[in-house]
Image (tube, rainbow, N blue to C red):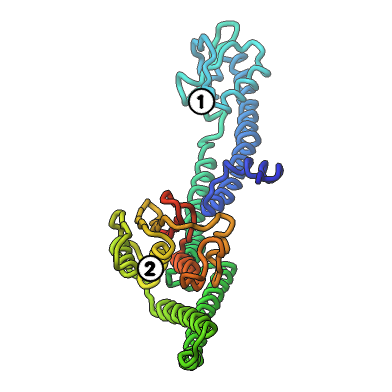
Amino acid sequence: MAAPPDLAHRAASRRWLPRSFYWRALLILIVPIIVLQLAVALMFLQRHYEDVTVQMTSNTSREIALVRARPELGESLGIAAVAGPKVTQIRPWDLSGRAMRERLVEVFPDLVAVDTVSNRRSVALRFADGTGLEFARSSVSASNPHQLLVLMFGVAIMMTAISLLFMRGQIRPIRRLARAAEGFGRGQDIAYWPTGSTEVRAAGTAFLAMRARIERHIEQRTLLLSGVSHDLRTPLTRMKLELSMMEGDEADALSRDVAAMERIIDTFLDFAREDAGDVRQATEVLALVREATEAASPRGGVVVEGVPVEAGLFPDGMRRAVTNLVGNAMSYGTRARVEVAATDGTIVVTVEDDGPGIPEDRRADAVRPFARLDTARTNTRGNVGLGLSIVRDVARAHGGSLRLGTSEMGGLKAEIILPR
């Protein structure tokens, strides 16, 4: 589905922005400082630097006019007679030199050339009558005018560096919260305590409360499954004893139903027991998959392939997930293949078989608890509808997922995708 035009336009207009919150916050901080520095610099250059230069040049021009009328006063006024420059020489970035020349041209229309390059400390003039004068540059320009700019930019750089350190300290708690949330989503228990500003502390406290509620819910669900399953064993045992003394087709049908209920209870108890005591630890995935495959299919018929790779897993849960998939594959097919593949970010455990498979439109229902698929994997072979559901829960506990597809062998292809 395509994005609305206004959202697409907004996304396109923001592509130039950095993706990290740290750099975006830094950009918000630095841009106003730069704009302020440029505004102050322009105001200083225009109002102070150039205007002061024009004012000082106007004062000096009176002395120049006096020396041109009475050359003997040149020494006392600090203006010396020279040959004068042939052409005007002013550096492009010498703003005060340009302002000085413009003012001198206004006062002396016969001014031919101005030189501020040959001697940086003096200004040489040549007039149309061939005479030339030289005087100190300090008499027409403010001394050390760059000091204000240097001080201004120096303080700006220092304050930006301090703000940079402060910003890193403020963003660090957000990154810690993100790592804790990501780890919890992958089934990892990362130590976290709220720090930082009030808003970040509030978000961290809310995360801890949410994590506690989810963990409490999982614990209560496990205890409920375990308690109910355990309590059902007694009436089922009595029913088995009564059915053993009965004869007939109805008794056989009821016995099969009781056996199916026992399998459901055993599945609940095994899952609850393994979920409660399982601890994430470094595990060699290929070796675990081989072990689970041999347990699910002791008579063989399953090919195990892949590369050795180590990852942090809940070994009991992962073993049960692989056992369920391989058991289902051999129940509904005659051959199966198990493969372990690894990339930079994921580990994929694939189980394929040559059975009837599951139609694409029924795969979402297949992972629901107690789901029965009449056209493919039905309950006639002892399926209690929890195998794929447990595999999905195990994958989610690792922060991964279960994906169903069509195998090249013609049956079902089940992939457990785990983050590394």
Q: For the residues labelled 2 and 1, say whether their Cβ atoms are less than 8 Å apart.
A: no
- The CA distance from mark 2 to mark 1 is 95 Å
Image location (x, y in percent) of residue 367 = 53, 65
* 100 left or right of 387 in image: right
As helix, strand or loop, the secondary structure at mark 1 comes to strand
Identify the image quadrant of the C terminus: bottom left
Callout 1: 10 Å neighbours few (<14), some, many (20+)? some
Q: Which mark is residue 323?
A: 2
- Residue for point 43% across, 72% down: 189
Residue 222 visible, this orientation: no
- Residue for point 50% across, 66% down: 181
Image location (x, y in percent) of residue 209 = 55, 76
As helix, strand or loop, the secondary structure at mark 2 comes to helix
Residue 249 visible, this orientation: yes
Q: Amino acid at mark 1?
A: Ala
- Residue closer to the observer: 118 or 184: 184
Image location (x, y in percent) of residue 250 = 54, 83
Q: First in sequence: mark 2 or mark 1?
A: 1
- Residue closer to the observer: 210 or 152: 210
Considering every residue shown, the one lying at the far front of the view is 248
- Residue for point 59% across, 6% down: 129
**What residue is shown with label 1?**
136
Q: Which mark is residue 242?
A: none
